Image: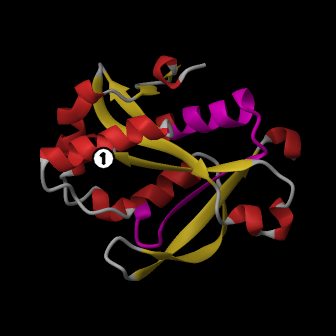
Amino acid sequence: MKYEDFILKCEYVEIKALEMKYLRDFYEYAMQNEVGPSAGWKPHKSIEQSKKILNDFIDSKLEYGIFQEDKLIGMIGVYEDDYLYAQPEFEGKTGVEIGYSLNKNYWNRGIMTKAVKCFVNHLLKDLDYDYVSCSCFVENKKSARVIEKCGFKFYGEHLYENFDGTNKLFNYYYIKNLKEG
């Protein structure tokens, strides 16, 4: 399936390919001071900055939009797992890491939990990965709660270099494909 054709219908939302027509929606939440830093990136300062980043996301074909009634309210991405794959118990396993962000105006509604569950189900069942990993900063209790509600298990803590050059501690989680036990 081509990136442009991807649509995953979930409870409350759809997860689908990004398009430049959603630039204003993206900028609306990417500029929010509460969103970027909790996900490890600086809030956007201009719509031009958001346009460049959105274009990069579209080109990467790794980032997907979370939509409610055709409004982009967040994103979920899938990346190469660069931490767990190096751990002995994950040797020889196929896995990916996910990351996500959500417009603060949609927080505390269960939307991200539903989107993450739906996306992880797709990765494990449809794409047959052995595991999916996810992480959040130790102090990001809202994200940790989403991860836990989605059935991820705590793996450990790891240092991460933040956008401002500081090292921050984050919690690492994983969920295994049921075929793995």
Residue 174 x/y as whole percent: 67, 56
Res 111 seen here: no
Residue at (46%, 21%) from the top-left corner?
4
Is residue 155 among the parts visible in the rendering? yes
Measuring 44% from the left and 25% from the top, which residue is drawn there? Answer: 16
Identify residue type, mark 1: Ile
Side (left or right) of 19 relative to 87 = left
For this view, does 26 lie left or right of residue 139?
left
Whether residue 116 sits left or right of residue 68 in the image: it is: right
Colour pattern: secondary structure
- Is residue 134 or residue 85 the one in the foreground? 85
Q: Is residue 30 left or right of residue 160?
A: left
Q: Is residue 136 above or below residue 54?
A: below
Q: Position of residue 72 (x, y in %)?
A: 29, 31
- Residue most extreme to the left: 46
Residue 40 appears in which quarter of the rendering? bottom left
Q: Which residues are magenta?
A: 116-141
Q: Secondary structure at mark 1?
A: helix
Q: Please check the rendered image and state whether residue 130 is part of the magenta-colored stretch, yes or no.
A: yes
Residue nearest the viewer, comparing 121 with 97: 97
Instruction: List the residue tagged with mark 1.
Output: 53
Residue count near mark 1 (Cα–Cα under 10 Å), binned few <14, some 14–19, many ≥20: some
**Residue 177 picture location, percent across and down:** 78, 42
In the rendered image, which quarter is residue 155 located in?
bottom right
Check the image and report above or below for 159 versus 143: below
Residue at the image position 51 percent from the left and 72 percent from the top: 170
Is 24 part of what is drawn in magenta? no
